[in-house]
Image (cartoon, rainbow, N blue to C red):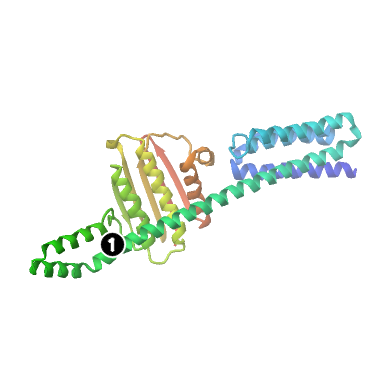
Amino acid sequence: MILWCINLICLLSLIIYLSVELVQQKGAKWLLLLLPVALLSGAFAVLSKYGVWGFLLLIGVGFAILHLGSRRVSWMFFSLFYLVELGLCLMQAAAPQLSSPISWLMTLIFFLAENNQRFLRQSYEESMMEYQNKVVKKQVEEVQNLYLTMRGWRHDYHNHLQALKAQIQMNQLELANEYLGRLEEDLDDIRQLVESGNVSLDAILNSKLSYAMKQEISLNYKASVPQSLSVSDIDLCVLIGNLVDNAVEACEKLPKEKRFLRLYIGVFRKQLYISVTNATNEVVKKIDEEYITTKRGNHGHGLKRINNTVEKYSGFINRKNEPGVFATEIMLPL
C-alpha cells in the first residue's frame, strides 16, 4: 500500500509540473494533449503491474512537448535522456520486484533533466541580458558624449560668432577659416533629431534615427517623456534600442522606396506609451512565444529582451503584423 501511494505521489507530481509548465510556456490549449496521456499513464502506473511503462509514456511525451523544437536542447541530450529512461523500463522487465523503485528513479531523472534545462535557460538569458546591458551602456555613454558636446557647442554659439567676427575685422581670414573648420569637425556626423526630455533616450534615438536616415528610411517620429520615470534609463534605452534596431533591420530588407519607420513616445492614460511601426516583407499569422523563440540572430534576442523588460515593469505589449506593416505598442507604468 505504501509503495502504491508513493507511485501515485510521483505520478501526480509529474502531471502537476507538466501542466504548469505547459500553461506558462505554450498556453492552456496544450493541456488537451496532456490530459489523455496523463489518464493513460495513470491507468498503467496505478492499475497495471507494468507501471513503469506508464511513467515512461508520461515522461517521454511530456518532455517532448516541453522541449521538442527548442534550440536550447540538443538532439544528443534528447537521445541520452530517452535511452536512460527506456533502459530503466527494460530493467523492470528483468526484475519486476523493482518496479516501484525504478518508477521513482525515472521521476527523479526527469526532474533532474528539467532542472538542468531550467538552469541552462536562465544562465543563457542572464548572460544575454548582461551582455546587452554592457553594449547599450557603452553605446549610451559614447553617443551621449557626442550629444552633450553638441549641446555645449550650441550654448557657446554666441562666443563662436564673436571670435569669428573679431578675426574677420582684423582681416585674419586664414585663422577664421581654420576656426570654422574646427567647429565643423565638432559637429560632424551629429544630428539633433529628437529632444524628448531624457538625455539618455535622446542619445539613443538621435544615434539610431540618424543611421536610419542614412539607410534612406522614411521617418516620422515624436518623443516626449516625463523627467521622472519608474523605468531606469538603461532599461528604457534597451527597450527603445531593440525596437528601433528591429524596425531598421526589417526595412533594410526592402527596396528603398518602400522603407518607412514611425515612432511615437509619450504619456497616455498616465502610462508611458511607446509605438513603433515599420515596413516589412514578413507576414506572421500568429505572434506568440513560439514566434519569438524561433527568431534567429539579433532579432530574436531583441524580441526576447523587449518582452523581459516589459514584464519586469508589469507593462503591456501588443504586436500586430499585416501585409507590409509590423507594429509594436508598449505601455509602462509611470
Indicate the secondary structure of the residue bearing disc 1.
Answer: helix
Q: Relative to residue 313, is residue 187 drawn left or right? A: left
Is the residue marked by circle 1 packed among few (<14), some (14-19), or many (20+) residues within 10 Å? some
Whether 306 is drawn above or below 280: the answer is below
Q: Which residue is mark 1?
A: 150
Q: Relative to residue 128, is residue 157 drawn left or right? A: left
Q: Residue drawn at (65%, 46%), measured in percent from left and top? A: 118
Q: Nearer the viewer, residue 175 or 42?
A: 175
Q: Nearer the viewer, residue 174 or 309?
A: 174
Q: Amino acid at mark 1?
A: Met
Where does the image place residue 304, in percent across and percent down from the top left?
A: 51, 46
Whether 100 is drawn above or below 191: the answer is above
Quarter of the picture holding the N terminus:
top right
Where does the image place residue 178, in percent across and percent down from the top left?
A: 18, 61
Residue 209 visible, this orientation: yes
Q: Nearer the viewer, residue 179 or 267?
A: 179
Q: Residue drawn at (35%, 39%), measured in percent from left and top? A: 251
Residue 175 in which image quadrant: bottom left
Residue 168 in which image quadrant: bottom left
Q: Relative to residue 153, is residue 313 drawn left or right? A: right
Where does the image place residue 190, in percent across and percent down from the top left?
A: 28, 55
Q: Residue drawn at (50%, 45%), measured in percent from left and top? A: 301
Residue 165 in which image quadrant: bottom left
Where does the image place residue 208, in percent across and percent down from the top left?
A: 35, 50
